[in-house]
Image (cartoon, rainbow, N blue to C red):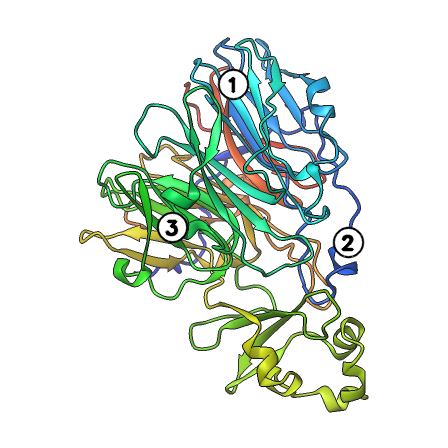
Amino acid sequence: MDLMHAATDGPSGIFRDLSAEMAFNYRHKENLFSDFNRERLIYHMLSTPGPNIAIADVNGDGREDLFIGGAKDSPGAFLEQQGNGKFRSINDAVLVKNLTSEDTDCLFFDADGDGDQDLYVASGGNELPSSSSALIDRLYINDGKGQFELSDQILPTSRFESTSTVEAGDYDGDGDLDLFVGIRLRPFLYGVPVNAYLLQNDGSGKFSDVTASVAPELSNLGMITDGLWSDFDTDGDLDLIVTGEWMPITLFENREGHFTKVENGSLGIGPSSGWWNCIKEGDFNGDNKPDYVLGNHGWNSRFRASAENPLVMYINDFDQNGSAEQIIARKEDGKYLPYARRHDLVTQMPAMKKKYLRYSSYVGQGVEDIFNPDQLAKSIKLSAEDLASSVLLSQPDGTFILEPLPKMAQLSPIYGLLVYDFDGDGLEDILLGGNLYDVKPEAGRYDANYGLFLRGNGQGQFTPVPSKGSGFKTYGQVRDLKLIHIQGRPYVLVARNNDTIQVFGFGNDES
């Protein structure tokens, strides 16, 4: 199925940028930190993952409110919707207590079963060591009137880990909401696989780690970026899909409350290891079964990957000095050539200077030439074969087809996705946004995405509508897209790193 349609202008004015007249009293402020000072051989910073937005009616007045996460040393914000459509800040005092945490995800859900919306905030980033209590995730309990109190639980487990994502679902069918929590990385050890967890709710908002007994294959799964509860096998219970960096799209089938990893080949999914960032569910081909859209790195960078010529990364303490090195390489003519320049390599591993006194001696050297077989055999080796942002489309026989989105969706890494019928034709569309500025100069920052509206045709295909035609144009580093109703009308919120919230109106439908 060919999704690579040429861009068309389409109808004008689907979206209207209302950011100036509907300004939110919040600006995300990223803290100053350079990952490259500590890990010289990586190319993308991992310390700027936010902000994310959560939407819910927190005080029972029928109006949707929001929480937006903060960066390290800067609090997030509860913003309560007033009757006039304006928003005011609440609960400031409770949030200030956790200034040192980096908010990486957030979720409103009814944790304690009392009918109101509580809030889970994930703590992560790449700045803090594993000994820091600022990595503890936070559960804020709502009193029903929109006032929140921090639970004393240490979440997701007693270990301090850099969390990336949290999702709620009743996987065991007991009527309360349980949690999937994914870990992004081990500080100072980028590339080493980390865990995901299943936290079982006792019905009163107390969570216990049941991963070892219910989903042991979540342990050491990889560098997790997102997760989704979804009944992908349509048997009536919630299954789980997990995405990550240097990871394949990973599906876990729920079998009477226990989860088993499904081999992608049995689902018709070919090699899918990528630099996946996010996933959302939809029904894009009209068969009343779940489909998925996934944000990946894209095609517009010096990093290219395919099943025949994958990217690889070796992780090891090659020079035995107590710190790990990450060697990222591309396959050319049967040889893995490192991306690292000579001076970066010898700065990280000074002993290499004797081997490569000049740049000319380093040219054309493969990983197998630089390191001995024993070093490589003892390394963790990760690969990536697919960098395309894509859709995963259900088929009549229960399998899936993974198809790349149109070329305009591949111009930058995608971090924000939103699925909705934006043009009112009864078919689901996709909004997406991305960009990453914190990239090593030799790779060049990824800033070619200005937001994109993809119009769905109900058969699993999408036509990109440029900003001039759609009216949807974002600026900066988009990290999240959310739908909110303000005075009964739908709007799109765009959360941007180190910036304000953009607001877009669309359509004429009352809600």
Q: Which residue is painted at 48% across and 61% down in the image?
A: 274
**Residue 111 in picture, x, y percent from top left:** 47, 23
Question: Would residue 418 be visible to someone looking at this image?
Answer: yes
Q: Which corner quadrant of the image does residue 439 belong to? A: bottom right
Identity, as a three-letter code, of the amino acid under mark 3: Phe
Label annotation for residue 98: none
Structural crowding at the residue carrying mark 1, measured as other residues with C-alpha within 10 Å and reported as few (<14), some (14–19) or many (≥20): many
Q: Quadrant of the C terminus?
A: top left
What amino acid does circle 1 point to?
Answer: Glu
**Left or right: where 189 falls relative to 167:** right
| Label 1: which secondary element | loop
Do the residues under discs 3 and 1 have CB atoms within 8 angstroms? no
Which residue is identified by label 1?
64
Tell me the CA gap for discs 1 and 2: 37 Å
Mark 2 element type: loop
Mark 3 Cα within 10 Å, few/some/many (few <14, many 20+)? Answer: many
According to the image, label 3 marks what residue? 462
Amino acid type, callout 2: Ser
> Rounded to the nearest whole Å, what is the CA distance between mark 3 and mark 2?
38 Å
Q: Position of residue 91 (x, y in %)?
A: 67, 17
The number of numbered discs placed on residues in the rendered structure image is 3
- Please tell me which residue is depicted at 76% across the width and 59% down the height of the picture: 38
Is the residue 306 above or below the residue 141 in the image? Answer: below
Task: First in sequence, mark 3 or 1: give its number.
Answer: 1
Quadrant housing residue 105: top right
Distance of mark 3 from mark 1, alpha carbons?
Answer: 30 Å
- The residue that mark 2 highlights is 34
Q: How far across and how far down the image is residue 259, in percent?
A: 33, 46
Which numbered disc, 3 or 2, marks the residue that appears first in the sequence? 2
| Residue situated in front as seen by the camera: 126 or 52 | 126
Left or right: where does residue 425 sit relative to residue 336? left
